[in-house]
Amino acid sequence: MGTVFEWYDFFIYGSLAVLFSTLFFPKGNETAALLAALATFGAGFVLRPFGAVVFGRLGDLVGRKKTFLVTMLVMGFATVAVGFLPTFESIGWAAPILLVCLRLLQGLAVGGEFGGAVTYVAEHADVERRGFTTSWIQITATFGLFLSLIVIVLCRASMSAEDFANWGWRIPFIGSIVLLLLSLYIRLKLQESPIFQEMKAQGKGSKNPIADTFADGRNLRHVLVAIFGAVAGQAVIWYTGHFYSLYFMTTTLRMSQDQASFYLLTALALGTPFFLFFGWLSDKVGRKWIVVTGCALSALLIIPLFQGLASYGNPALAQFRSKTSVVLTGNDCRQDQSFVGQLFRPKAATHCQTVKALLTAHAVPYTINTDAEPLRIQINDDAPKTFDDAALLAALTEKGMPPANTPAQPNGPMVVAVLFALIFLATMVYGPLGALLVELFPVRIRYSGVSVALQLGNGWIGGFAPFVATAVVIATGDIFGGLWYTVAFAGLTAVIGAFLLPETRGRDLSN
């Protein structure tokens, strides 16, 4: 329960990232603001490996229980503080700077959270049920996301859209203090891990867990194999299915926030039990090949599934896209190629940026040339012309684009089916992962090894998946282009895992 609430704290920002792009970043360049909001979500992952090092060391030196009490307090403070932050309109650039700092604190806390929780549970579990028992920890991230979406939906339903944008968004953050107190109460009732106590009593503990993790060749190999043979694939698959799918539905397919949240909540409710199923199955047939198979299937299916999501999520828009292409030709597009430049450029958007943002917002595919000035736009086989925004929207509408104020008419059951398939793939990879990681590392450095391996893969590879995918879409005009990031890491993980990842089921955790 404590871990569910900690993930709620971490993910409540991700569930509101699109709204935060309008609150905490300057107006006038919506594309850059969206990228900045997603990058700030990713900033929460930057310090996760450092949190793994700091709290992993504490967990192996002073104990599992005391350490994840500290992570809970840090997370709770940072989350409540976000609810009191002034917006960009009030204090200017200090607003996003403070927001990033709080996200970094959250990342630091989460970095030491999962490793401690899964190690604690695994060291209490029966050897024959270790995969199933630790899979309850695996579902906590999904439950945290589920809880954050529920709270946001209830807040939106209880007030006007204007009130929610002005002050209602603060309620989920400030209200999390109740969850913090409940979580602390739960954790204070826990006893220390018996395996850790036995290790300390026998004097077998590590004096420097981090040095023993990275300086010992055997342990370092375990870390690298864990990252690139299991965690990297799990990370991109989980965040693509759980988070990027939400952005994709609201920004690309133009579903309402309520529609997208309802479909994702339904898919999460249907898919979450499979974390437990695959954890249980790993106790019967082993961990390795379930994880490897899940990564391989994801590499093959992620793009077709998102293509299906586009078709079922907004059929009219999908039909328009299939028969429409746009070519942008202009010198101001040359400096616009770098999405990093878009992220950090504080000036107003160029004409090319504005057009790209408009086309991206309407899911219109485009390609870019940089040969002429001013910007000229060619739609299908028409002659290239210079358009202002209103004229461009009118021309696209004439070609069959659904008007911006036309609500999406999704095929609800099929959207849920596609989202369920994405969640199912994540459960296949993630369900057995906790037991696998715990069994991979010796007891004297287990908290450190599990935390570092998981947070390097999740923090630096998986956490930026929504940002990278969105940035690639804006840079290329291909709404599916950003998914190649997920495909690449899922495929790489499947290959490395197949050859190098050992089978760990049944290992003695006291060694």
Image: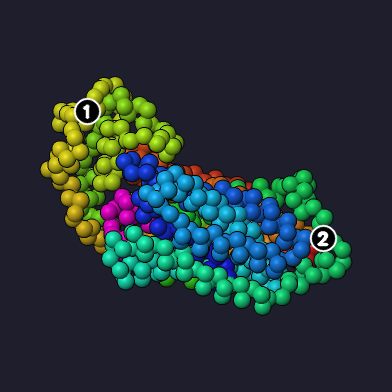
| Residue at image mark 2 | 205
Of the pair 188 and 266, the residue shown nearer to us: 188
Helix, strand or loop at label 2? It is loop
Quadrant of residue 193 in the image?
A: bottom right
Q: Of all residues shown, which one is farthest toward the right?
A: 202
Mark 1 is on which residue type?
Answer: Arg
| Residue 463 in view | no
Q: Position of residue 373 (x, y in %)?
A: 25, 22
Mark 2 is on which residue type?
Answer: Gly
Q: Quadrant of the C terminus?
A: bottom right
First of labels 2, 1 by sequence position: 2
Q: Position of residue 96 (x, y in %)?
A: 46, 48
Residue 281 covered by magenta stretch: no
In the image, what residue occupies the spot 77% across and 69% down? 195
In the image, what residue occupies the spot 46% across and 60% down? 84
User: Seen in the image, is 107 located left or right of residue 441?
Assistant: left
User: Seen in the image, is 205 located left or right of residue 374?
Assistant: right
Answer whether labels 2 and 1 touch (C-beta < 8 Å): no
What type of secondary structure mainly makes up the magenta span? helix
Q: Tell me the number on the disc at residue 113.
A: none
| Residue 484 in view | yes
Q: Position of residue 243 (x, y in %)?
A: 43, 56
Number of marks: 2
In the image, what residue occupies the spot 25% across and 60% down? 410
Span colored in magenta: 245-258
Q: Residues within 10 Å of mark 1 (few under 14, many from 20)?
A: some
Q: Residues within 10 Å of mark 2 (few under 14, many from 20)?
A: some
Q: Of all residues shown, which one is farthest toward the left?
A: 398
Helix, strand or loop at label 1? It is strand
User: Seen in the image, is 37 located left or right of residue 177?
Assistant: left
| Residue at image mark 1 | 376
Of the pair 24 and 297, the residue shown nearer to us: 24
